[in-house]
Amino acid sequence: MDNKKKILVICALGYATSTMIKKNIEDFLNDSGVQGWYVEAIGLNMADGYIKDASIIVSSLNLNPKDYCVPVVNGISLISGINKEDTLKEILNIIQTMD
């Protein structure tokens, strides 16, 4: 995984919500044929040690993008299903600008 870029999924505790978002992103990346990326899910209290390696952050929390040096995507739609495709397209657009 060292050469892969990381999408960091952050939720409050790092269990169910982030795992659900992670699965949606992984399925989308696989279905889209995107390679060279992996997804990691964590809780906000553990985020500091992981953020430095992230290329994209997707979160169910209301994170302020100005607090981070990488793009931050609101991932609530990946749980609710409302506008899910738009969020996945946003992630794909970011990936394409980085590849």
Image (spheres, rainbow, N blue to C red):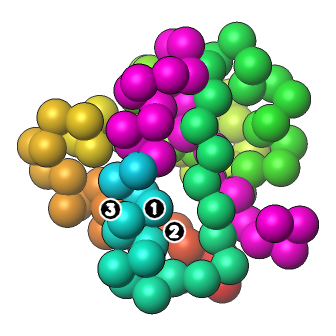
Tell me the mark number nearer the camera, choosing from 2 and 3. 3
User: Could you tell which of marks 2 and 1 lies nearer the N-terminus?
Assistant: 1
Q: Which residue is mark 2?
A: 94
Q: Quadrant of residue 64?
A: top right
Report the span colored magenta. Answer: 1-22
Q: Which residue is mark 3?
A: 88
The percent position of residue 94, horizontal first and vertical second, equals 51, 68
In reply to whether residue 14 is colored magenta, the answer given is: yes
Q: Is residue 19 above or below residue 37?
A: above
Q: Residue at x 41, y 57 (%)?
A: 25
Give the amino acid at mark 1.
Glu
Q: Quadrant of residue 37?
A: bottom right
User: Could you tell which of marks 2 and 3 lies nearer the N-terminus?
Assistant: 3
Q: CA distance from mark 2 to mark 3?
A: 10 Å
Locate the C terminus by quadrant: bottom right
Judge the density around disc 1: few (<14), some (14-19), many (≥20) Cα neighbours within 10 Å. Answer: some
Residue 54 horizontal side relative to residue 57, left or right: right
Q: Is residue 18 above or below residue 33?
A: above
Give the amino acid at mark 2.
Ile
Tell me the mark number nearer the camera, choosing from 3 and 1. 1
Locate the N terminus by quadrant: bottom right
Q: Which residue is mark 1?
A: 26
Q: Residue at x 37, y 38 (%)?
A: 20
Q: CA distance from mark 2 to mark 1?
A: 15 Å
